[in-house]
C-alpha cells in the first residue's frame, strides 16, 4: 500500500473550519483515499473515503486534488468532540495506518 | 453499521501465559481483522481472520504467537501466546463487509493487555 504524509499535529478553535492535509504522491490509479479518526481511548472510526471526486457526508468533506497526489479532510465546524488523531490511508484492500495528525480543538 | 464487542476489555497477565480475546459482531461480515496498538503508537495489522480457513498474517506476525480462529461470520478469537511485557498493547478487532456494499471498516473498543 502507498504511503501518506500528514502533519504530526494541528490546532483549531471550536466552531471554526479545519483543513487536514494529506500528501500521497505515489498513489496508484486504483488506490482509494480513506480517512479514519481515533478519539481518546476508543477504536478508530470511519470518517470518509473517495477515489477521484470530492465527497461529502454528515461528518466531513474530502477534497481530492486533480492529480490525486494530495487530499484534504475538511471539518466544517470543529467541536471539542472532534479532538482526535486523524489517519489518511491509501488502500485497495487492507488498511495500513500511519502516524496520523493529532487534532486539538480549543474552546 | 456494525456493532462490535470484545472480551475482555482489559486484563493483566503474567509473563509466559496466554490470553484469548474474543470479538463478536452483531451481523454477518465477510472480512474480520486483528490489529495491535502499542502505547503511543499507531495501529499495526496483525492478520486477516478468514472464515473456514487459516488466517492471513502480516509480516512480523506468526501463527504460533498469535493463533486466530474464525468459526463463523460473526465471531473470531485472537490468542496472544507465551506473553512477554513487549506484548503489552491494545488489541483491536475490526470488520468490513464489502459483499454487503459497505466499504468502511468498523472497529471494536479494544482489549487493553498488560503483561507483567
Image (cartoon, rainbow, N blue to C red):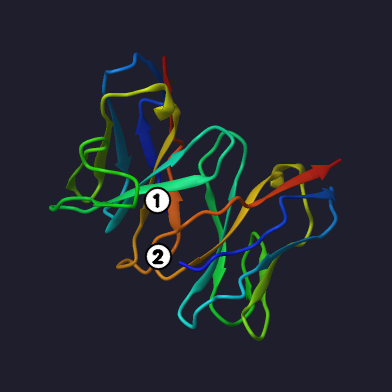
Q: Which residue lies furthest to the bottom in this view?
A: A66
Q: Residue B102 carries which label?
A: 2
Q: Quadrant of residue B22?
A: top left
Query: Residue A30's image quarter?
Result: bottom left
Quadrant of the image containing the N terminus of chain B? bottom left
Protein chain holding label 2: B
Residue carrying label 1: B2
Left or right placement of residue A20 versus residue A36 in this view? right
> The residue marked by circle 1 belongs to what chain?
B
Q: Nearer the viewer, residue A44 or A78?
A: A44
**Element at label 2:** loop
Label whose residue precedes the other's in the sequence (1 or 2): 1
Which residue corresponds to the image point at 27% horizontal and 18% vertical from the top-left? Answer: B17
What's the mark number on residue A43?
Answer: none
> Against B113, is A67 above or below?
below
- CB contact under 8 Å: marks 1 and 2: yes
Give the quarter of the image for residue A48. bottom right
Where residue B100 appears, as percent x and y from the top left, is: 32, 66
Q: Residue furthest front?
A: B60
| Side (left or right) of B51 relative to B91 | left
Where residue B51 sits: x, y (%)? Answer: 18, 53
Considering every residue shown, the one lying at the far left of the view is B52
Task: Tell me residue B54's x, y (percent).
Answer: 16, 50
Q: Give the crowd class for mark 1: few <14, some 14-19, many >=20 residues within 10 Å.
A: some
Q: How crowded is mark 2: few (under 14 residues within 10 Å), some or many (20 or more)?
A: few
Instruction: Tell me if residue B17 comes above or below residue B68 in the rendering.
Output: above
Q: Distance between the residues labelled 1 and 2?
A: 10 Å
A49 lies above or below B96? below
* Position of residue B14 measured from the top left corner of the image (x, y, whole percent): 34, 13
**Residue found 28% across the figure and 18% down from its top:** B16
Amino acid at each position: 500500500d502507498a504511503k501518506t504524509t500528514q502533519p504530526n499535529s494541528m490546532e483549531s478553535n471550536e466552531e471554526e473550519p479545519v483543513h487536514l492535509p494529506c500528501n500521497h504522491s505515489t498513489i496508484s490509479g486504483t488506490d482509494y483515499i480513506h480517512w479514519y479518526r481515533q478519539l481518546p481511548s476508543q477504536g478508530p472510526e470511519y470518517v470518509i473515503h473517495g477515489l477521484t471526486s470530492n465527497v461529502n457526508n454528515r461528518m466531513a468533506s474530502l477534497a481530492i486534488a486533480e492529480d490525486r497526489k494530495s487530499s484534504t479532510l475538511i471539518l466544517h465546524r470543529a467541536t471539542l468532540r472532534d479532538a482526535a488523531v486523524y489517519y489518511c490511508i491509501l488502500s485497495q484492500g487492507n488498511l495500513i495506518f500511519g502516524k496520523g495528525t493529532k487534532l486539538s480543538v480549543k474552546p | 453499521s456494525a456493532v462490535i464487542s470484545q472480551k475482555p476489555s482489559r486484563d493483566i497477565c503474567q509473563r509466559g501465559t496466554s490470553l484469548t480475546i474474543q470479538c463478536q459482531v452483531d451481523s454477518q461480515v465477510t472480512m474480520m481483522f486483528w490489529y495491535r496498538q502499542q502505547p503511543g503508537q499507531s495501529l499495526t495489522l496483525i492478520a486477516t481472520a478468514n472464515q473456514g480457513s487459516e488466517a492471513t498474517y502480516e509480516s512480523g506476525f506468526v501463527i504460533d504467537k498469535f493463533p486466530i480462529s474464525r468459526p463463523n461470520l460473526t465471531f473470531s478469537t485472537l490468542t496472544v501466546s507465551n506473553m512477554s511485557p513487549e506484548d503489552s498493547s491494545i488489541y483491536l478487532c475490526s470488520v468490513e463487509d464489502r459483499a454487503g456494499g459497505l466499504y468502511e471498516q468498523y472497529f471494536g473498543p479494544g482489549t487493553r493487555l498488560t503483561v507483567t
